[in-house]
Image (cartoon, grey):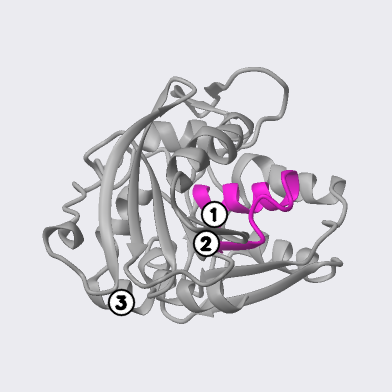
Amino acid sequence: MTNSPSTLIRPPPPVAELALFRNEHPTHSLSRRTIAADGVAHRLFLAVPRSSPPAGGFPILYLLDGNAAFDLMDAGQLAAASGLILAGIGHDTDLRFDPPARSRDYTPARHAGDPYPDPNRPDRLIGGAGAFLQRLTGPIRESVEAGLPVDPARRMLFGHSLAGMFALYTLLKRPGAFRHIAAASPSIWWGDEIMLELEAKTGDPGEPHDVLITLGDSERRSSPAGPHWQGPAPHTLEMIRRLSQRNNISVTSRVLEGLGHAATLPATLPLLPAFARNG
């Protein structure tokens, strides 16, 4: 099974400085805390509008890899999200990312049971997407939304890379949990194309869903441990093609000029408020 894009040892992710939390902001009140969801610690980063909510409640945007999302967000981007609750769901680390936890939580399983060792990285577990989806739509959501005026019909989920794959996994496995799904450079190639297999086995959702998928035109996979290509990711293009043919799924795709895989995360963040509001 091909799961890892590179066999090289990578440097650790940078520390999440979270400069956004150092100042007050006119549009949102910011807070952060750590919770335990089914025995797993997660860091929550919240930006709640200071304005009065509409009659049905505020739309809410859930940002996976919340440590990184709030670290990369600037005051201008926060202001552009006025009237929108932002909820960053992060792992329990001071870094932008926790790679082992991402591998465990964001990857689908090929068989039932607990997460199991990655054949290419035996020090990491994979296959915990189902369990994380249960936490996300259960205790994590309950903690995030407690006491907040949320419009349950306007929940949105965003992820990048493995988290982008998880966002699309959520669309296929739990339609209706989030009516808006956004994925930046989702790792559709992962696990010998398990996501394309899942898509082929899944029916259309019963209600309309809006999907945004972004990818760079300079992405690449070139190591012996991963598929070989350079340019827009072919597996992602195939997923876009398939989802676009489905009933009750409206797909918007954007190829981001001059960007590789990592750069699609900060480039997609500014696109999310309008998508969350308008679909």
Q: Is residue 155 above or below residue 34?
A: below
Decide whether residue 71 is among the magenta residues.
no
Q: Residue furthest bottom?
A: 257
Q: Helix, strand or loop at disc 1?
A: helix
Using a 10 Å C-alpha cutoff, classify the residue at mark 2 as few (fewer than 14 neighbours), some (14 to 19) or many (20 or more).
many
Q: Nearer the viewer, mark 3 or mark 2?
A: 3
Estimate the x, y position of residue 208 in percent, counting from the top left: 78, 66
Q: Are marks 3 and 2 in contact (CB under 8 Å)?
A: no
Amino acid on which the number 3 mark rests in the picture: Ala
Q: CA distance from mark 1 to mark 2?
A: 7 Å
Q: Position of residue 246 (x, y in %)?
A: 84, 66
The kind of secondary structure element at disc 2 is loop
Left or right: 167 as drawn, with respect to 208:
left
Quadrant assignment, res 112:
top right
Q: Residue at x 20, y 70 (%)?
A: 25
* The residue stretch that appears in magenta: 162-187
Amino acid residing under circle 2: Ser
Image x and y of residue 230, in percent: 52, 66
List the residue tagged with mark 2: 185
Mark 3 to mark 2: distance in Å?
25 Å
Q: Earlier in the sequence, mark 1 or mark 3?
A: 3
Residue 217, compared with residue 58, is above or below; it is below
**Residue sitting at x 53%, y 69%:** 215
Task: Evaluate if marks 1 and 2 touch, with contact meaning CB atoms under 8 Å apart.
Answer: yes
Secondary structure beneath dot 3 equals helix
